[in-house]
Image (cartoon, rainbow, N blue to C red):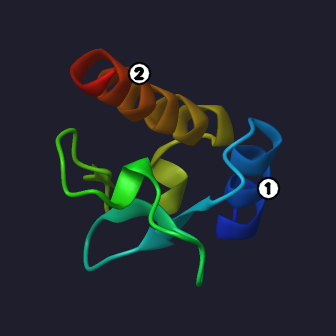
Amino acid sequence: MITLKQVNKAIKADGHYDIELVKGDGYFYFCTIGTADESWIDKGYLPSPCVMVPRLNDLTINGWRMELQNIWDEYKRLYT
């Protein structure tokens, strides 16, 4: 069983120091941590930072890392 703390630690290990995974109502989403300045993930552009799975354990830690990487890759493709 994985925890949000484990997933967020893995996200930071990948270099996304200002982003964390949080739980919504029936889904999870990536957002800027605390009082950090707005990052690319909070700009309101596509792709959506939401992952539509109801349980954290529906994905592995590597699965969550890949979800964020896919969002990042799509953002770069669209806006850089």
Q: Which residue is drawn at 74% across and 35% down?
A: 14
Q: Nearer the viewer, residue 54 or 9?
A: 9
Q: Which of 39 and 72 is in front in this view?
A: 39
Residue 62 position by quadrant? top right
N-terminal of the pair, mark 1 or mark 2, is: 1
Circle number at residue 73: 2
Residue highlighted by disc 1: 9
Q: Disc 1, disc 2: CB below 8 Å?
A: no
Question: Is residue 1 visible from the viewing direction of this image?
Answer: no
User: Is 7 rendered above or below residue 55?
Assistant: above
Q: Label 1, label 2: how many angstroms apart (C-alpha)?
A: 20 Å
User: Is 43 rendered above or below residue 13?
Assistant: below
Task: Residue 38 in the image: state x and y as whole percent.
Answer: 45, 66
Quarter of the image that includes the N terminus: bottom right
Residue 24 position by quadrant? bottom left
Q: Which of marks 1 and 2 is in front?
A: 2
Task: Residue 63 in the image: state x and y as whole percent.
Answer: 54, 33
Q: In this view, does 3 lie to the left or right of 70?
A: right
Q: Which residue is drawn at 32% across and 50% down?
A: 51
Q: At label 2, which amino acid type do we have?
A: Asp
Disc 2 secondary structure class: helix
Q: At label 1, which amino acid type do we have?
A: Lys
Mark 2: few/some/many CA within 10 Å (<14, 14-19, 20+): few
Disc 1 secondary structure class: helix
Q: Which residue is drawn at 38% across and 63% down?
A: 28
